[in-house]
Image: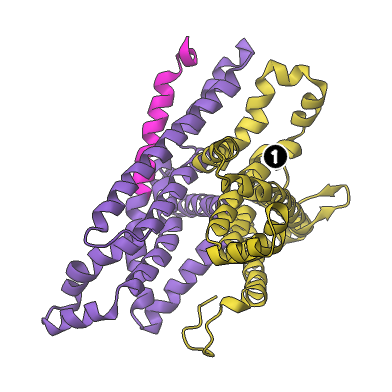
Chain colours: A purple, B yellow
């Protein structure tokens, strides 16, 4: 039988992986915008913490940060609940996964957006100012749509990295597609034979189709945001 | 508690002991070995990748497509658990001996992964070689191997340096996955220490600091290398528009 009857589990794991990746993307996107705004604000008390955030987070391996944040928070929670005489409260692995991945890749998005905003010609700000637009309006109506064109290659890259980083969350107990395959391997291990290879190749192909699909989507987006500009090549 | 952890584990965090190497030394060794082997693989692969002959370029495209499109963790699991589940692998004495060892599997997965990314970086740099340089070289009668060795590669590898430095740092970070394959790299020591003392913040924080230090050292080294080898691409005016490190 195909996949030894573990097809539904693998599918459920795939859905979990996609949801996790999309959730992390949303969070890191938002953090990236905030981080870029802080870095470009020109105010030291905003720019310095933002710089610390991007340097430290991008300088430490994602797996180390993931384990550090997940277990430290759980440890902290345990100490608090112990002190209050409450029963132990376990962090939901999905929430933890989204938060940690979002926090990590927010640093990468900060750099992407910072570069993209700087790539929009200054004249655009000046023209908006001449029309009497507020800073907020200028950003959302004038700068943001143009910035996206410069940011898209970076966003596409970050998204692919996030998608592949979700494979790590099985290590903090989330039932993603990698975990589903590992469960399937354990479940069929008594039967011997090729099962480990089959399941892992199935996971690889699932990821491969997800990255291929993302490629197509981002290509379409790049065409959309480049309207009015000549193709560069 | 924290002092005890430090006293018991500091040596394991850094180098362990002769014969039982662990921690930072293992991490650095894994990084250097996979980066060097990956580089050696990527150079010929990149030249094949830019070839106009489909039978040379297509297999390389497929290779980089697979290894860049799937997570390294999955690739490691395939090398470590997947291949060994194949009867054909276990029945061949040489393959059996190779794949039995966790270190070999890990190094294989890391090398192929970084080779795939590096191939694309180098291929991109080769494609960006100004047409005039190649034309001038041909006018001097160079072709094939000599053209690549004297003209294309020296300038392409220089141009690839910023992207390549990024890849090396990512590889350093990716070696943390070795800890899932029973190798006592820096992260594995941190995991042992964390479960021994129930001090996850200290145990992982220490590892994070060491990784950060190595990353910053690498950034600094590559910055120096770029100043030396990319001096010809720097803006002429002193300090104006100087690119940030």
Give yes or no for residue B141 being in the magenta stretch. Answer: no
Query: Image quadrant for the C terminus of chain B?
Result: bottom right
In this picture, residue B25 sits left or right of residue A150: right
Tell me the subunit letter for badge 1: B
Q: Which residues are magenta?
A: A1-24
Give yes or no for residue A23 being in the magenta stretch. Answer: yes
B119 vs A195: above or below: below
Q: Dot 1, how many residues are within 10 Å of its Cα: few (below 14), some (14-19), or many (20+)?
A: some
Residue B118 visible within the image: yes
Residue marked by disc 1: B108
Q: Residue, x 79% and y 58% (percent of image)? A: B11
B177 vs A11: above or below: below
Looking at the image, the residue that sits furthest to the left is A131
Number of numbered tags placed on the structure image: 1
Q: Residue, x 36% and y 83% (percent of image)? A: A43
Q: Position of residue B42 (x, y in %)?
A: 65, 49
In this picture, residue B52 sits left or right of residue B175: left
Query: Image quadrant for the N terminus of chain B?
Result: bottom right
């Amino acid at each position: 039988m195909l996949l030894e009857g573990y097809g539904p589990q693998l599918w459920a794991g795939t859905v979990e992986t996609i949801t996790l990746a999309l959730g992390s993307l949303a969070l890191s996107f938002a953090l990236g915008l905030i981080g870029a705004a802080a870095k470009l604000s020109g105010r030291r008390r905003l720019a310095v913490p933002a710089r610390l955030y991007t340097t430290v987070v991008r300088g430490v391996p994602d797996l180390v940060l993931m384990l550090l944040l997940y277990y430290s928070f759980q440890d902290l929670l345990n100490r608090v609940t112990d002190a209050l005489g409450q029963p132990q409260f376990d962090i939901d692995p999905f929430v933890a996964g989204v938060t940690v991945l979002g926090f990590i890749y927010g640093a990468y998005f900060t750099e992407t957006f910072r570069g993209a905003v700087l790539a929009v010609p200054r004249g655009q700000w000046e023209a908006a100012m001449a029309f009497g637009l507020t800073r907020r309006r200028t950003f959302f109506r004038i700068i943001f749509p143009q910035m996206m064109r410069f940011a898209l290659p970076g966003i596409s890259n970050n998204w692919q990295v996030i998608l592949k980083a979700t494979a790590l969350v099985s290590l903090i107990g989330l039932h993603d597609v990698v975990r589903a395959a590992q469960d399937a391997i354990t479940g069929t291990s008594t039967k011997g034979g090729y099962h480990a290879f089959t399941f892992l190749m199935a996971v690889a192909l699932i990821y491969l189709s997800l990255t291929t699909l993302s490629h197509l989507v981002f290509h379409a987006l790049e065409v959309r945001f480049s309207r009015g500009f000549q193709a560069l090549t | 508690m924290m002092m005890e952890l430090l006293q018991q584990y500091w040596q394991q965090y850094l180098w362990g002991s002769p014969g039982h190497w662990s921690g930072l030394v293992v991490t650095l060794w894994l990084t250097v070995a996979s980066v060097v082997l990956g580089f050696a693989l990527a150079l010929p692969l990149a030249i094949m990748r830019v070839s106009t002959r489909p039978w040379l370029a297509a297999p390389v495209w497929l290779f980089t497509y697979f290894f860049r499109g799937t997570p390294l963790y999955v690739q490691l699991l395939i090398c470590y658990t997947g291949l060994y589940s194949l009867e054909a692998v276990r029945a061949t004495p040489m393959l059996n001996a190779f794949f039995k060892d966790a270190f070999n599997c890990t190094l294989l997965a890391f090398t192929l992964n970084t080779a795939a990314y590096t191939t694309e970086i180098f291929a991109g740099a080769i494609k960006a070689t100004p047409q005039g340089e190649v034309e001038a070289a041909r006018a001097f009668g160079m072709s094939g191997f000599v053209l690549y060795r004297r003209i294309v590669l020296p300038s392409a590898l220089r141009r690839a340096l910023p992207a390549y430095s990024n890849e090396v740092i990512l590889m350093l970070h990716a070696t943390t996955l070795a800890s899932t394959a029973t190798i006592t790299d820096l992260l594995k020591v941190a995991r042992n220490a964390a479960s021994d003392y129930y001090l996850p913040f200290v145990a992982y924080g220490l590892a994070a600091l060491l990784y950060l230090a190595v990353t910053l050292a690498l950034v600094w080294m590559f910055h120096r290398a770029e100043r030396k080898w990319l001096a010809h691409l720097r803006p002429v005016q002193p300090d104006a528009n100087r690119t940030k490190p």
